[in-house]
Amino acid sequence: MKNLTPIYTLLFLSVTIACSNTVTSQKTDSTNKVINAETPGIKSQNQALQKRIEQIAAAARGRVGVAAVVLETGESVALNSKERFPMQSVYKFPIGMAILHQIDVGKLKLDQRIKVDKSDFVKKTMRSPLRDENPNGAEITVGELLRLAISESDGTASDVLLKLAGGAEAVGKYLKEIEVGEMVIANPEKEIGADWETQYRNWASPDGAVQLLRALFEQRELSESSRALLIKLMTETPTGLNRLKKLLPKDTVVVHKTGTSGSRNGITAATNDIGIITLPNGKHFAVAVFVSDSPADEATREAVIAKIAKAIWDEWSK
């Protein structure tokens, strides 16, 4: 991308270099998932880290799922990583990837203009700068729809992109093509906003979310320019400043996507953040933290995510 700042350029270079090197100490199982090397140092570190994560998670008083892996080495830690959690706006990330893939194969263009009608708008209680700034509808490019959906977490933009992608079934097919499992996109934002239970049908496990982050890292079924654009949008997002990024050094590069639900009867269904974080040594770890069905206030829920990210950072920065 011609308008990338040096920090993004450095990130893309480090990702490319990391992906081109083979870590000989890794082993893989029949599904090609990385198995940690059986060394006492890594095992004891991960046990201590997992215990610390469990302690932090207790403050949410709900369900907390965590998966994290150093993408170059396979070192990992997990908590409830196979459980299903409502994604909320995290699901705009795979929708965006599917759209960029369609751009890469020539089915769509970034500068293609799309008509957005008032009938496409999500309801007023759902986030949509597109709706708020264009109350009578608009004609907008696919590129701007991507920026709104990914960086601004715009529900209307996400629904228009989901329709352009061919619907939930088409996005699900794309996820299979890039070998991402344990993630289901079933409904547009308008349907999720209309019924509390629907959000639980649009779910991911922490492991599934990390698989998606790895797919981005490894540039699966994405051109270099599409990956660069997606990373740029996920790095520049103003959402979730009190989550993964909050307690990390200010110059840390965090490529991430948040998701947040409303509350019912004092219970918040989803407070999420997933991303790829660059370590001081130039390596990267993918992390997914889902806080679900929690009676804690927003500050507490976000602090759980921030403290978990910091605990992982501290351990893997040694």
Image (spheres, rainbow, N blue to C red):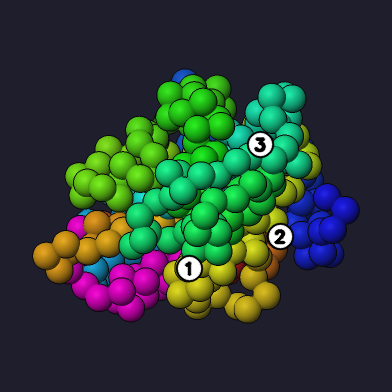
Residue drawn where x is 84% and y is 58% of the image: 3
Q: Nearer the viewer, mark 2 or mark 3?
A: 3
Percent across and percent down for residue 250 are 63, 78
Relative to residue 15, is residue 289 drawn left or right?
A: left
Q: Give the class, few, some or many, for how many residues have Cα within 10 Å of label 1's Cα (few <14, many ≥20).
A: many
Which residue of the protein is positioned furthest toward the left in this rendering? 265
What is the C-alpha distance between the residues marked 1 and 3? 23 Å
Q: Nearer the viewer, mark 1 or mark 2?
A: 1
Question: Foreground residue, 207 or 21?
Answer: 207
Q: Main secondary structure of the magenta part?
A: helix
Residue drawn where x is 69% and y is 30% of the image: 108
Q: Is residue 44 above or below residue 92?
A: below
The answer to whether marks 2 and 3 mark residues whose Cβ atoms lie closer than 8 Å is no
Q: Earlier in the sequence, mark 2 or mark 3?
A: 3
Residue range (magenta): 293-313
How many labels, in total? Answer: 3
Helix, strand or loop under label 3: helix
Percent across and percent down for residue 222 are 69, 33
- Quickly name the residue at label 3: 100
Q: Earlier in the sequence, mark 1 or mark 3?
A: 3
* Residue 273 part of the magenta-drawn span: no
Percent across and percent down for residue 114 are 63, 39
Q: Is residue 80 above or below residue 268?
A: above
What is the C-alpha distance between the residues marked 1 and 2? 23 Å
Helix, strand or loop under label 1: loop
Q: Which mark is residue 240?
A: 1
Q: Amino acid at mark 1?
A: Gly
The answer to whether marks 1 and 2 mark residues whose Cβ atoms lie closer than 8 Å is no
